[in-house]
Image (cartoon, coloured by chain):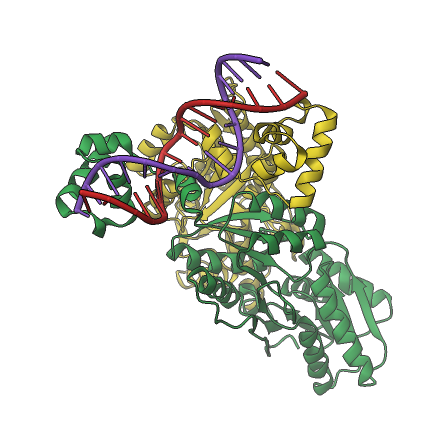
Chain colours: A green, B yellow, C purple, D red
Amino acid sequence: METVGRLAGVSQVTVSRALSDPSKVSPATLAKIQEAIAQTGFVPNALAGALASSKSMLISALVPSITNIVYSSMVKAFSEEMRREGYEILLSETGFNAEEEEKLIAAHLSRRPDAMFLTGIHHSAQARRMLLAAEIPVVEVWDITDSPIDFCVGFNHAETGRAAAEYARRKGFAQVGVVSAGDERAQRRGDAFVREWERGGGGRVYRAFFDATATLANGRAGLLRLLEQGFTGGLVHCSSDLLAHGVMIEARARGLDVPGQIAVLGFGDQPFADAVEPPITTVRVDLAAFGRAAAQAMLGPLRGDRSGPAIIDLGFEIVERKSA
Amino acid sequence: METVGRLAGVSQVTVSRALSDPSKVSPATLAKIQEAIAQTGFVPNALAGALASSKSMLISALVPSITNIVYSSMVKAFSEEMRREGYEILLSETGFNAEEEEKLIAAHLSRRPDAMFLTGIHHSAQARRMLLAAEIPVVEVWDITDSPIDFCVGFNHAETGRAAAEYARRKGFAQVGVVSAGDERAQRRGDAFVREWERGGGGRVYRAFFDATATLANGRAGLLRLLEQGFTGGLVHCSSDLLAHGVMIEARARGLDVPGQIAVLGFGDQPFADAVEPPITTVRVDLAAFGRAAAQAMLGPLRGDRSGPAIIDLGFEIVERKSA
DNA sequence: CTGTTAGCGCCTTCAT
DNA sequence: ATGAAGGCGCTAACAG
């Protein structure tokens, strides 16, 4: 800035002002400064700016996995919203691991982000302590709790399982199965489905649980397991559309009709859900809305407005298509 | 650090040393300092550190889309590798837009990253200028050029199209079609396929081009378009596995046998490719390897070693399965 | 509208 | 092994 200022015949501060608030500088000097910037190829040092102003314009975001479309969709919508306000996103992957999350929180906090986007509501005690001490807005996305750190944006996972069980009952299925992946929230949905089904006197629930991530191959293997357990047909509740699709493929490969013999209920309403044959009946959650709501929630305090709601339940909806 | 130091009975510098290189501090004082840190909940300010040392330990990464598994897979592998060395990733989405990329490069550069990960080899002149002026290692991933800014890691896109056309010829298909999405590199693969097919005297190529991103629905619509043009059966070259899968679903929905009447060749070898029915014959590229190679390439100069190769062609391979 | 003076919190260099 | 001084590049007051 010093150099640019000399070239434009002004002091360093004036250059700073020209960049941060052009209206504070006369049009004539502004022009000279802009020319000097163009000539020198000057790029302001945001680190120094952040240090001096204690506003980094950096937002920290932690997701379990960036290759999982569920999380990347939320982050995408969130980023777009925040970038419009001039913020940049520091993104890392926790791998569904609380210890890893704790380390990442410490690492991110050392860069003095202005706010933090976290996935889920379970964090280590030490993590919560650091977050509280940092005194920045924290938004927990993809789940709901009565006691968020600052804000939470999501839906009730157990409720989706209950709704699915009701749906299965209403449709008159005699047998039901559950195929779910290792994610804690996925399990919670499956467990709630089982409880509600049993509560209604529905009898045994066939189950296939995978310790790993949801894949088509696991969906196929999942149906196989149910069949081996004696499942002869009915509705299969899956913790994701990908698993649901896998179940459908395996059913067809074995000559079982979908939904005639094997009906499938997915989760997520991912883009492919209504493009496959038959289109998948699924639990829809609006991922982009979660991202946008998270952005709006943190922008409140970031602008000094602490009046927004702390708990934002965006709900879900069962979309009935052909598969169940 | 001042405060921590006072608590531990040492000066601020000693605290700094204890954190950056514990071996430079005596075990006794180190213990005292660590206790003081635990008591105060001190979190070092990486901004100040970066400003003073001009090493931000920050890597800038720009991808067209974070929800696209192709890019997120590369970034995932890249991040893991860089994080092991203590670097953090500033990630943004360009939306396949060169202007947007230019703006993002400027924004990222102002945070003084130690290196930059870029997708593709086409950047605006102004972007190249800024990158050169920044004097940091730049790695361009997912494509190959003779004149990278610093390094490029990828494969020859046109070559995959040629190889696919040869494959189609070898298998004796009489008619071929191409379904491709809007990405410039996807088009390049499709164009090369068409040229090679025509060069070999293969006759007309039926084509369906989508201006948008690759989806299952577009795959289905793509086959429809080919059929409308008079395509009666043969091999369909798709610019992604997702499109290929869509073509397969549409074929089945119309009672066309895959691969008997409609054979399908995908691209990417995504995890689902061998889990669908029939498993998809596809062009495999090792996304994780690209990410790792990109990390290794930039870690060279970051450690002061300028001896590594500038152009890293990791190639591809056609994986023959049942769909073609 | 513009300049002056102090830091922001840390690292680097040079002493001790 | 530890400390003192200076500065990284910028912003925040406060003057004029």
Q: Is residue B186 above or below residue A226?
A: above
Quarter of the picture containing the N terminus of chain B is top right
Compare residues C10 and B78 and report the one nearer the observer: C10
Q: At 74% across and 70% down in the image, what residue appears?
A: A190
Quadrant of res B188: top left
The location of residue A48, given as percent across then percent down, is: 41, 38
**Residue A77 screen position, x and y as percent:** 47, 60
Number of dots carrying numbers:
0
Residue A139 x/y as whole percent: 56, 61
Q: Is residue A25 left or right of residue A214?
A: left
Residue at image location 71% in from the left, 38% down from the top: B35
Query: Relative to the observer, which residue lies in front, B31 or A4?
Result: B31
Which quarter of the figure has residue A304? bottom left
Residue B154 in view of the camera: no
Q: Who is closer to the viewer here, B153 or A312?
A: A312
Q: Is residue A126 above or below residue A270?
A: above
Q: Is residue A65 visible?
A: yes
- In the image, residue B3 above or below residue A200: above
Q: Residue at x 21, y 30 (%)?
A: A6
Single out the residue that lies furthest toward the left: A28
- Left or right of A144, for residue B179: left
Q: Residue at x 74, y 27 (%)?
A: B28
**Nearer to us in this view, A291 or B26:** B26
Q: Where is residue A263 shown, x and y percent of the image? A: 70, 75
